[in-house]
Amino acid sequence: MIFKAGKYQFDLQRSPVIMGILNITPDSFSDGGKFSSEDSALFHCERMINEGADIIDVGGESSRPGSDRVSAEEEIERILKIVEKINSRFQICLSVDTYKPKVALEVLKSGADIINDITGLSVSDDIARLTNEYGAGLCLMHMKRDPKIMQSYTEYDDIIVEIKDFLKNSILKAMNAGMKKEALILDPGIGFGKDIIGNKTILSQLRSFMDLGCPLLIGTSRKSFIGEINGKDVNNRLNGTLASNVIAYINGARIFRVHDVQENKDSLFVASEILNSGVKVEA
């Protein structure tokens, strides 16, 4: 399967794709405030690239449970200069995490290759129209309600069916805006309106989403459900993250949004070498 994003193309049959997280926010759940300055953001970006990141995902608004929304103007103020500097300084596929058309337009004009829409176009179809206009890739994620209240709505009649139906609709919106499937990624939204049972169900049944015909992205990095499983705080969830991502890879995910690039790159490389060796691996 091929994923095309701007001037970049990824052959997802060859190896897992690592998306390094660069939060330009004061309140993200794991690294809020660490990379708010231009120098610290660019230094961290360079470090992730040197560690093997294939994509850098820049975010200017926290989507942790209970977080407040920020205006498009504030989001642009936080991220636009960083996006411009990354694009001019590094040869790297650049993703921006936003659901606001005004923000998407500014970062696409500044060279972003992917728009990562956590609302799956449920806020605005214009995201797809703009992304298509600039020839960029688009990540469509499932989220139940708004981050402020989403963890109060974690019950589903059938979580896989509901997420799949949502993503089918998101794909349809994107294609109606002119996008092709080869430019789309799907993210079932680990931790976004899901409890521990929901998250484990998604990871164990990821292959249910593969007939939608788009690559699967998974973002488990340091999330609270890992702490619920192993009792570790947010700063000690690396091993749990690695385990969840290897399981996700075995079950069909090919793009991984992570904080710890080197460790995830190494573990997923070994997993891919085993799976692609011709030796049958039981999940």
Image: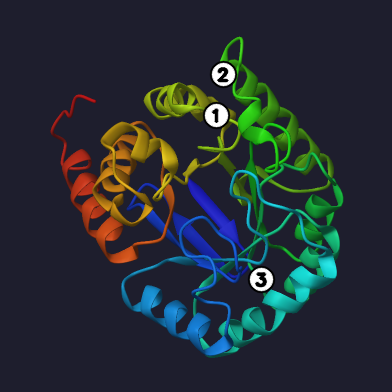
Residue shown at 44%/21% (left/top)? 197
The residue carrying pointer 2 sits among few (fewer than 14), some (14 to 19) or many (20 or more) residues within 10 Å by Cα, namely some
Which residue is depicted at the point 57% across and 83% down?
Answer: 86
Q: Distance of mark 2 from mark 3, alpha carbons?
A: 32 Å
Residue 67 or residue 14, whichever sits in front: 67
Write down the quadrant of residue 249 in the picture.
top left
Separation (CA) of disc 2 from disc 1: 9 Å
> What's the residue type where badge 2 is placed?
Ile
Q: Which residue is mark 1?
A: 194
The answer to which quarter of the image holds residue 283 is top left
Q: Secondary structure at mark 2?
A: helix
Local crowd size for mark 1, using a 10 Å CA cut-off: few (<14), some (14–19), many (≥20):
many
Q: Relative to residue 130, is residue 220 depicted above or below? A: above
Residue receiving disc 3: 112
In the rendering, at what x and y percent does residue 140 appear?
65, 43
As drawn, the residue found furthest toward the left would be 279
> Label 2: which residue?
159
**Where 263 sits versus 86, above or below?**
above
The disc placed on residue 92 is: none
Q: Which of the two labelled residues, at mark 2 and mark 3, occupies the earlier sequence position?
A: 3
Percent x, y for residue 105? 82, 68
Tell me what residue is drawn at x 17 percent, y 29 percent.
Answer: 281
Q: Amino acid at mark 1?
A: Lys
Looking at the rendered image, the disc whose residue lies closer to the viewer, 3 or 1, is: 1
Labelled pair 2, 1 in contact (Cβ < 8 Å): yes
Could you tell which of marks 2 and 1 lies nearer the N-terminus? 2
Where does residue 15 sit, x and y in percent of width and height?
A: 32, 53
